[in-house]
């Protein structure tokens, strides 16, 4: 392991993305998203994904020079065509329009379509909350979840995120979670490490519970809370593939495969102005204080110290530096 500063991770990630064909604007935004994830212990959505980004830039599966196109078909609806590029720059280009629409209407949506996977959904809702708005986000992924009692993969891990402003430019509460018991990356990491997984994370190809990560990858992940999580996963599917106009999970090809058709995913974000209730922030603060009366309890995302440096496996950092040093 090597201790690497978050600022250095951001710099080297940006260099790697530019070296593989991303524009300066795209690379800067994506490097920020990678650093954001690493600073919050979200290793799966940080450097772990950089090699995939770079390979897909070279093959054209993601368009590194794409210029997103923003439209506003209705007062409270902002749509942005990512042009098969990354989701983060598309969202960033639409954000000011969406934020203004939310202030004017009380509620607005930013619907990102024709986009690459958004990786850490919390990056988006965190930005919404820091702008003083309640943020909700939904996205889907390649099929890895069968209905409870079934064995045919139907939806993805289908994460959702929710973030609340604190009234002072910060975040009072934020969660970013898959609707499965664990994210798919936890299974792949267990397989790479030669470790078993806990029962309840996944089922094998026949729908039977398994602790073997390889059997899990051939089967399906389990929805969190059984039928309840399955319902939430379907909700996310409808918001992302339906409302945002993305590809249904069952038709999404593996997200990290270097070659193939673009992801063509949809990402749905809701922006709500809490100013309609003058006592909103006092209510949230009171709720947080009530939660904190028990030792060890806290609001999700609240009071979390962001890392300035993180331990990075030597092999991963060496690979990252090689990506950054690529020459045409």
Image (tube, grey):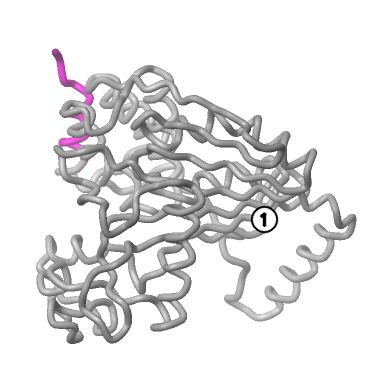
Instruction: Classify residue 180 by image quadrant.
Output: bottom left
In x, y percent, where is residue 249? 31, 57
| Front residue (pair 201, 307) | 201
Question: Which residue is located at x 68 percent, y 73 percent?
Answer: 292
Question: Which residue is located at x 62 percent, y 78 percent?
Answer: 295
Q: Which residues are magenta?
A: 317-328
Residue positioned most to the right: 278
Does residue 320 show up magenta in the picture?
Answer: yes
Q: Is residue 131 positioned above or below 193 on the image?
A: above
In x, y percent, where is residue 256? 21, 46
| Front residue (pair 298, 91) | 91
In x, y percent, where is residue 128? 62, 44
Instruction: Classify residue 282 by image quadrant.
Output: bottom right
Instruction: Classify residue 116 by image quadrant.
Output: top left
- Residue topped by disc 1: 164
Please state if 281 lies on the left or on the right of 93 as rendered: right
Task: Determine crowd level at label 1: few under 14, some 14-19, many 20+ residues with C-alpha closer than 10 A.
Answer: many
Does residue 147 show up magenta in the picture?
Answer: no
In x, y percent, where is residue 124? 52, 44
Please state if 107 lies on the left or on the right of 91 as rendered: right
Report helix, strand or loop for mark 1.
Answer: strand
Question: Which residue is located at x 42 percent, y 60 percent?
Answer: 237
User: Does residue 183 show up?
Assistant: yes
Please state if 252 lies on the left or on the right of 115 as rendered: left
């Amino acid at each position: 392991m090597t201790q690497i500063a978050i600022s250095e991770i951001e710099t080297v990630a940006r260099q790697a993305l530019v070296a593989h064909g991303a524009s300066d604007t795209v690379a800067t935004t994506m490097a920020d998203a990678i650093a954001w994830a690493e600073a919050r212990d979200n290793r799966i959505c940080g450097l772990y994904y950089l090699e995939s980004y770079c390979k897909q830039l070279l093959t054209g599966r993601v368009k590194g020079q794409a210029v997103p196109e923003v439209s506003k078909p209705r007062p409270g609806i902002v749509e942005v065509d990512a042009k098969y590029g990354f989701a983060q720059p598309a969202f960033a280009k639409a954000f000011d329009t969406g934020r203004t629409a939310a202030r004017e209407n009380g509620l607005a949506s930013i619907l990102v379509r024709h986009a690459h996977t958004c990786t850490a959904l919390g990056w988006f809702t965190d930005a919404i909350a820091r702008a003083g708005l309640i943020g909700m986000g939904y996205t889907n992924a390649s099929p890895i979840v069968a209905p409870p009692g079934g064995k045919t993969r139907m939806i993805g891990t289908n994460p959702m995120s929710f973030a609340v402003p604190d009234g002072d430019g910060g975040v009072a509460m934020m969660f970013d979670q898959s609707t499965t018991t664990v994210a798919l990356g936890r299974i792949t990491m267990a397989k790479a490490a030669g470790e078993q997984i806990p029962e309840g994370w996944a089922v094998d190809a026949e729908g039977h519970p398994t602790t073997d990560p390889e059997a899990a990858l051939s089967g399906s992940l389990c929805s969190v809370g059984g039928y309840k999580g399955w319902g939430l996963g379907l909700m996310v599917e409808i918001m992302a593939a339906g409302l945002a106009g993305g590809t249904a999970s069952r038709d999404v090809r593996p997200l990290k495969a270097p070659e193939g058709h673009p992801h063509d995913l949809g990402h749905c974000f809701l922006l709500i102005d809490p100013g309609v209730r003058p006592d909103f922030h006092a209510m949230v603060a009171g709720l947080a204080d009530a939660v904190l009366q028990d030792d060890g309890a806290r609001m999700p995302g609240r009071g979390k110290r962001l890392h300035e440096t993180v331990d990075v496996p030597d092999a991963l950092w060496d690979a990252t530096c090689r990506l950054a040093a690529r020459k045409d």
